[in-house]
Image (cartoon, rainbow, N blue to C red):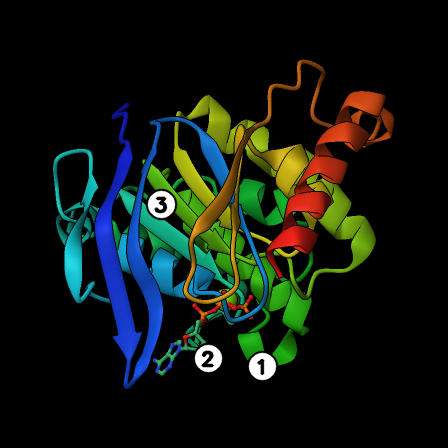
């Protein structure tokens, strides 16, 4: 299994006259899950798209391991799930999930196992148009996992998922990507989710995005709903909320 770290070296991005990302540098260690939290419009998705190679920085570089994102993506070692999942409307949920492996030129493993894991049992043959928004998001999550990527980029992947399912996914999915040694970047608006799922939380300022706090999440217990009730967990969440409040 490859171990891939992520380097953003002074990347910048402007749209028209608006500077969205000013020189932004960060190194994300291989095998770690890092959450990006910050106010709406601060540039989180823009940063993630540059890490994915979907957008090119105006200046600076992104390297995954020693390679540019597009090279890693071509090898099938990078996958993403974004809030607005782009699924093929004519393919069933099962076939959309399998696509993740097909595009990565990897064997299509046990799709049904993943379908069960994301709670879509019984909907495998439904097309995207016959699924709810939260279900479509879960198809996209399963599609991102099936290729067993070294780099996994998740942009508010649970935004439309109901609270109970979200809680279950928060418990069931991270062990999967951790056991595979994936390097994960997770954008989320939920501070609790950021703390629960991550090894590190980067709090970003309003646009243009700047790291205002870099908080290691060294929680020892099992990452489940019981951990959320501990004083340690509450202290970390409070710290992140305080930085977010200060930065606005
Ligand atoms: N393709 C684009 N063209 C013009 N402006 C853009 C484009 N993409 C993003 N922006 C602008 O860049 C800024 C940052 O957008 P981005 O989507 O990165 O924010 P975000 O932090 O992901 O916000 P949210 O939490 O609401 O998803 C916004 O002001 C947005 O309007
Ligand atoms: Mg966004």
In the rendered structure, which disc, 1 or 3, sits on the residue that comes first in sequence? 3
- The residue where tag 3 is placed is 108
How much space separates mark 2 and mark 1, taking CA atoms? Answer: 7 Å
* Residue 91 in view of the camera: yes
Circles 2 and 1, Cβ within 8 Å, touching? The answer is yes
* Residue 54 in view of the camera: no
Horizontal side of 230 relative to 116 (left or right) equals: right
Please tell me which residue is depicted at 67% across the width and 41% down the height of the picture: 240
**Frontmost residue, 79 versus 87:** 79
- The residue where tag 2 is placed is 89
Q: Residue furthest front?
A: 246
Q: Note whether 7 is above or below 160 in the view shown.
A: above
Report x, y in % for residue 76: 23, 47
Give the SS element for disc 1.
helix
Horizontal side of 238 relative to 208 (left or right) equals: right
In the rendered structure, which disc, 2 or 1, sits on the residue that comes first in sequence? 2
**Mark 1 Cα-neighbour bin, 10 Å: few <14, some 14–19, many ≥20:** some
**Frontmost residue, 159 versus 214:** 214
- The residue where tag 1 is placed is 129
Please tell me which residue is depicted at 65% across the width and 64% down the height of the picture: 135
Report x, y in % for residue 20: 36, 70
How much space separates mark 3 and mark 2, taking CA atoms? Answer: 20 Å
**Frontmost residue, 49 versus 16:** 16
Q: Residue furthest bottom?
A: 16
How much space separates mark 1 and mark 3, taking CA atoms? Answer: 23 Å
Horizontal side of 16 relative to 154 (left or right) equals: left
Please tell me which residue is depicted at 46% across the width and 67% down the height of the picture: 207
């Amino acid at each position: 299994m490859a171990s891939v770290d992520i380097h953003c070296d002074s990347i910048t991005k402007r749209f028209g006259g608006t500077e969205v990302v000013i020189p932004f540098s960060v190194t994300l260690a291989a095998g770690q899950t890092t959450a990006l939290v910050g106010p709406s419009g601060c540039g989180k998705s823009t940063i993630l798209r540059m890490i994915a190679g979907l957008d090119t920085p105006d200046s600076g570089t992104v390297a995954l391991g020693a390679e540019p994102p597009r090279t890693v993506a071509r090898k099938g070692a990078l996958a993403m799930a974004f809030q607005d999942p782009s699924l093929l409307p004519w393919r069933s949920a099962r076939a959309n999930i399998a696509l993740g492996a097909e595009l990565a030129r990897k064997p299509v493993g046990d799709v049904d196992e993943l379908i069960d894991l994301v709670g879509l049992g019984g909907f495998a043959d439904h097309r995207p148009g016959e699924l709810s928004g939260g279900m479509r998001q879960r198809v996209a999550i399963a599609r991102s996992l099936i290729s067993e990527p070294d780099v996994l980029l998740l942009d508010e992947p649970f935004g439309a998922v109901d609270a109970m399912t979200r809680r279950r996914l928060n418990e069931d999915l991270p062990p999967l990507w951790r056991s595979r040694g994936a390097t994960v970047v997770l954008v989320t608006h939920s501070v609790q989710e950021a703390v629960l799922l991550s090894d590190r939380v980067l709090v970003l300022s309003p646009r243009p995005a700047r790291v205002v706090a870099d908080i290691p999440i060294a929680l020892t217990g099992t990452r489940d709903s019981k951990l959320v009730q501990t004083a340690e967990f509450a202290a970390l969440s409070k710290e992140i909320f305080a930085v977010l409040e200060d930065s606005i």
